[in-house]
Image (cartoon, rainbow, N blue to C red):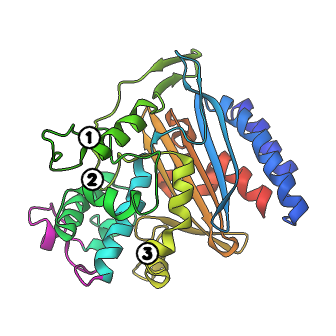
Amino acid sequence: MPRGYKVAALAVIAVAALHSSARGQSLAFSLFERYVEPLRVQTGIPGLSAAIVQDGQIVWEAGFGLADIESNTRARPDTPYNIADLTETFTTLMLAQCAERGLVQAEDPIRKWVPLAADPPATLRQVLSHTSGPTTLFRHDPARFVLLTHVVESCAGTTYKQALAQSILDRTAMSDSSPGREIAAPIAADGDPAFDAISFDKYAAVLQRLATPYKVDKSRGRTTRSELPAPSVDAATGLIASVRDLAKYDAALDIIVRPATLAETWTNVVVNGTAQPTTMGWFSQTYEGQRVIWQFGVVPEAYSSLILKVPARRLTLILLANSDGLTAPFSLQEGDVTASLFARTFLRLFF
């Protein structure tokens, strides 16, 4: 284990006995903030934004490092980032809305909506839970998840980005967000087919503040600006948002869909009698006897993200970064959030 990670691991152990009383929780916020900065440095992240949500309200938020190195622009809670695979959770909610209207079912074959989908055959539930491979066991496969873009569009009767804006972004007043980086300018006085002039101006303003993505070569101590990833948004990736906006989203999950529907999306998929680490659009596991719902995102050499929820405590951690250092070093695609030192530190402090 690298020396820096050993230091972080010792910090985790040192706070393991902290109790979550009101006073202890206040101390936990302070300690978490104290440990995030060295973790950011150790993982080579130029800029990191963070928020903790309790009972639907932001109880702590902060920015660390730089959203843009060249202009010396600090990372802030309202800094927008590409949230990468966290977009999958938005897709899940939009399909859950469709299911509540009786337009789709979790057991629908994907080929009902995408006739040319490659073998093996799979249901929407299997694609949503990354269990649609040859063995139907969990295998993280964002490329397969992209097929759900067409399902959302068929259900909504509009483009994916329009559906995303109308059903979630506008509804939850996510003012630091944009449905991707590719927002066409209006072509006529009455607006373009996707967004009107007001929406275009709003999204353009958000994109001007987008955190610059960086590639970090820790062995050489070199950080270089990355080429921006493809500008499109789809069911698997591409949504632009800030941690402050994701906190609004988190607080509205059981309003966007019914609580019973949300509970179903958080149910682990079972294959041959064995529970897989995924639900529909999320991961789920147990930590210290309590259920943890989470999802990570990564755009290699550009962006990374993490959302971690403890439903029984109505507690959520949200992290966004402008390099892949937040999640890539920890192999979160294997399905264990405690592999992340950021997540482990948070869990040890608040349990």
Which quadrant would the N terminus be assigned to in this image?
A: top right
Q: 20 or 338: which is nearer to us?
A: 20
Residue 27, position in %: x, y? 87, 52
Q: Is residue 45 visible?
A: no
Q: State the residue at coordinates (52%, 52%).
A: 245
Q: 180 or 328: which is nearer to us?
A: 180
Using the image, determine if residue 85 lies above or below residue 282. Answer: above
Residue 37 forms part of the magenta stretch: no
Residue 85, position in %: x, y? 41, 51
Residue 106 forms part of the magenta stretch: yes
> Badge 1 is on which residue?
183
Separation of residues labelled 3 and 2 (CA atoms): 22 Å
The numbered disc on residue 165 is none
Separation of residues labelled 2 and 1 (CA atoms): 9 Å
Quadrant of the rendered structure where residue 218 is? top right
**What residue range appears in magenta?**
101-122
> Badge 3 is on which residue?
265
Whichever of callouts 3 and 1 sits on the residue coming sooner in the sequence is 1
Q: Secondary structure at mark 1?
A: loop
Q: 95 or 9: which is nearer to us?
A: 95
Whichever of callouts 2 and 1 sits on the residue coming sooner in the sequence is 2
Q: Secondary structure at mark 3?
A: helix
> Badge 2 is on which residue?
161
Residue 96, position in %: x, y? 35, 75
Q: Is residue 127 visible?
A: yes
